[in-house]
Amino acid sequence: MKNLLLSSIFMAFLLSSVIAQTDLEFRHFNVTNQPIFGGNNFKAAAVTSTGKIWVGSQYHGLVKYDPVTDTWTKSPDILDVSINDIKAANNGGVWVGQSGRQLSQGGSNSVAGGVNYYPGPDFTGMQFYSVTSGGNLTSRNVRSVWVDETRKGPDGKMRI
């Protein structure tokens, strides 16, 4: 009797969670229905606190989707780099880790790779950090970004 009661409660719990699911709308975006993409090789995405979706691709740039206006916008700053990671900051900004452009000789070295920071909800005010721009990076080939906004380092500074 006890097992039957426990089984009934468990089944009621499972059914209530299934019934409580809301309807979700899924939309499929690709270069066919969004030519602004330039290609379909996306490697990174992040959603900001304002609800905007930032997506990075391999050599086709950085684009941002605004679900309120249902529009995609392309960044004029980084058009043909390999974007490897995107992280949203608590203040609505976005950090982009990228490997730059491949050399025309087909080598494995990157040109102009580093970290791009967009401080607001659009593409204005972009800041670039690299091995040569005072970003203290050791490589132009940035594969991932980690943002420590708690400033718990020994000097109280934010770590990227």
Image (cartoon, helix red, strand yellow):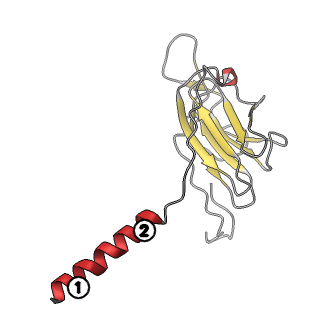
Residue linked to disc 1: 5
Mark positioned earlier in the residue sequence (2 or 1)? 1
Residue at 65% x, 53% y: name it.
88
Kindly identify the residue that appears in the image at 64 percent across and 70 percent down. 150
Q: Position of residue 10 (x, y in %)?
A: 29, 76
Q: Which class describes the residues within 10 Å of circle 1: few (<14), some (14-19), or many (20+)?
A: few
Would you identify the image quadrant in which residue 97 lies?
A: top right
Image quarter in which the C terminus is found: bottom right
Residue type highlighted by circle 2: Ser
Q: Position of residue 141 (x, y in %)?
A: 55, 35
| SS at badge 1 | helix
Q: Quadrant of residue 154?
A: bottom right
Q: Secondary structure at mark 2?
A: helix
**In the shown orientation, is residue 13 left or right of residue 118?**
left
Residue 138 visible, this orientation: no
Foreground pick, 72 / 62: 72
- The amino acid beneath tag 1 is Leu
Residue 12, quarter of picture: bottom left
Q: Give the residue drawn at x 69%, y 65%.
A: 157
Toward the viewer: 134 or 86?
A: 86
**Is 17 left or right of 99, judged from the image as shown?**
left
Say if 48 sits above or below 116 in the image: below
Residues packed near mark 2 inside 10 Å, few (<14), some (14 to 19) or many (20 plus): few
On screen, residue 89 versus residue 146, left or right, reads: right
| Residue beneath disc 2 | 17
Residue farthest top in this picture: 105
Residue 22, x across and y down, in percent? 54, 59
